[in-house]
């Protein structure tokens, strides 16, 4: 039985009213690859648009907070916290977004959207000098809480 389709075959938002409130955490990562020169300019805060990595962190947090407005079947949940970390990788950066809540439904989508928006912000701020950047590998690393329990990517 499909959970997001009603008896008339129309979309519906799942009712989570009878579910228990549990502490839920999701951690997501994603990567952006770019030219060596672009990465150096970002690291040296040498782009016209300003501090790229700090702006991407703020954007990831803001994106997490707007998830229910962007993903049609996502519930609007109270987010307890969003933590964003940026790591240098060869030819780019890896962004990690960890979101947490105490709610009746999960927070994976908030972490995924936050990561996507953070990476997209890096692209936006550096596109004037590098239109060949590639955003990739956005994936759930960890999820805990709720009926389905814990998921840990191997």
Image: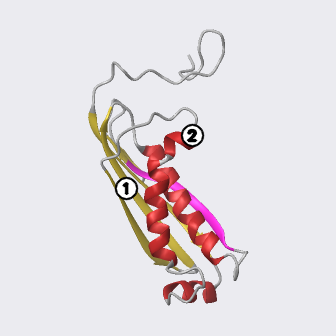
Name the residue tied to disc 2. 71
Quadrant of the drawing holding the N terminus? top right
Task: State which tag comes first along the sequence, 1 or 2.
Answer: 2
> Where's residue 118, x and y in %?
52, 63
The spot of residue 48 in percent (x, y) is 60, 85
Residue 130 lies, in percent from the top left, at 70, 80
Can you identify the residue that label 1 sits on? 98
Taking 121 as reference, is 138 above or below it?
Answer: above
**Residue shown at the point (57%, 21%) measured from the top left:** 12
- Model colouring: secondary structure
Residue 140 among magenta residues: yes
SS assignment for the magenta stretch, majority: strand
Residue drawn at point x = 47 percent, y = 78 percent = 88
Count of numbered circles in the view: 2
125 drawn magenta: no
Q: CA distance from mark 1 to mark 2?
A: 18 Å
Which quadrant of the view contains residue 122? bottom right
**Element assignment for label 2:** loop
Residue 35, quarter of the rendered image: bottom right
Please tell me the numbered disc located at residue 134.
none
Q: Nearer the viewer, mark 1 or mark 2?
A: 2
Q: Residue at x 57, y 40 (%)?
A: 71
> Circles 1 and 2: CB distance less than 8 Å?
no
Q: Image check: 53 left or right of 81?
A: right
The range drawn in magenta is 133-142
Identify the secondary structure beneath mark 1: strand
Please tell me how crowded label 2 is: few (under 14), some (14-19), or many (20+) other residues with Cα within 10 Å.
few
């Amino acid at each position: 039985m499909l959970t997001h389709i009603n008896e008339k075959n129309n979309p519906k938002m799942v009712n989570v009213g009878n579910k228990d409130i549990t502490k839920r955490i999701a951690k997501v990562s994603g990567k952006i690859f770019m030219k060596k020169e672009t990465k150096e300019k970002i690291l040296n805060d040498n782009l016209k648009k300003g501090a790229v990595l700090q702006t991407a962190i703020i954007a990831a947090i803001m994106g997490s907070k707007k998830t229910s407005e962007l993903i049609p079947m996502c519930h609007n949940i109270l987010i307890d916290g969003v933590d964003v970390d940026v790591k240098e990788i060869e030819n780019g950066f890896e962004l990690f977004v960890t979101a947490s809540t105490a709610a009746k439904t999960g927070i994976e989508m908030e972490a995924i959207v936050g990561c996507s928006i953070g990476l997209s912000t890096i692209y936006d701020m550096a596109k004037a000098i590098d239109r060949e950047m590639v955003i990739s590998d956005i994936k759930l690393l960890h999820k805990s809480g709720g009926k389905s329990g814990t998921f840990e990517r191997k």
